[in-house]
Image (tube, grey):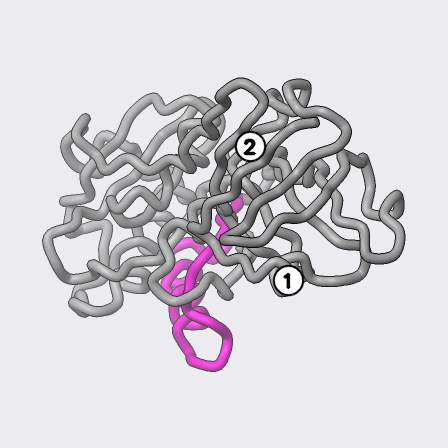
Amino acid sequence: MKPLISLLTDFGVNDPFVGQVKAAIFTICPDAEVIDITHEVDAFNVRMGAFLLASATPYFPENTIHVAVVDPGVGGQRRPIVIETRRARYVGPDNGLLIPAAEAEGIKHVYELTNRSMMRDTISPTFHGRDIFAPVAAHLACGRPQKELGREIKNYVRLSFGEPKIDGRQVTCEVVHCDKFGNVVTNIPRRLVTSLTPQLDVRAHTRRFRARLVKTYSELEGNNLGFLIGSHGFVELAYRESSAARKLNLRPGDALCITMD
């Protein structure tokens, strides 16, 4: 089986950046297979990148190397790292971007990338995705041992999506992501769904909405708001064939207060 490398960035597709990253990989490891998760993370939005990465990586085969670059601190004091988990490796900046995905798989080791021989000869201070992360991933894909990466570290930057707070019949949660369809993803995990009642009162900003728990979008009719478990494993707010984010005027980071009947 050919080595598999995934890519997730905020580079977009109008500039040559993604092509340059892939060129750096294939120059070192021409047998690698590269899969794009997305290059449409909002610019500099580490939290969004972390959510999308954690949503995608469980569906990749074991031993995939995941390269993720949402890196507003490029060229500064933040470190380049590689994380080894029980089933994959993650290459990217030490800014929390890799952590939710890696923690879900069980982190075994975290290395600071210091071995210059695994990077391009010339390193741009503004493009570590091409000059550090892509070459390192390619070397790993071609069998370079992890012991050559650099020293193991424990003080890496953490990032989490937080935990909703349950106080009696009231749940306070946060909007983590709004997808292309306008579905509003919260930080309520699947395991807490049994704590919710079928009918809910949602307060967003100063407005209130009635919502009900459903299993599929097709169960919603007309202008009814629904709560359901998305494919990512978190509870989301949705309208059928319409944007809940627009109707509720919600963005990532906004707080929601849910009261159960």
Give the image location of residue 18, x and y in percent: 44, 69
Question: In the image, 108: left or right of 213?
Answer: left
Disc 2 residue type (three-letter): Ile
* Residue 191 appears in view: yes
Disc 1 residue type (three-letter): Lys
SS category of the residue bearing label 1: loop
Mark 1 → mark 2, Cα distance in angstroms: 20 Å
Q: Residue at image x 32%, y 55%?
A: 135
Depth check: give the residue in front, 75 or 142: 75
Residue 215 position by quadrant: top right
Depth check: give the residue in front, 245 or 73: 245
Q: Is 87 situated above or below 204? A: above
Residue 72, magenta (yes or no) = no
What's drawn in magenta, residue-wise? 3-31
Label located before the other in sequence (1 or 2):
1
Q: Residue at image x 71%, y 39%?
A: 227
Query: Quarter holding the N terminus?
Result: top right
- The residue that mark 2 highlights is 188
Query: Quarter holding the C terminus?
Result: top right
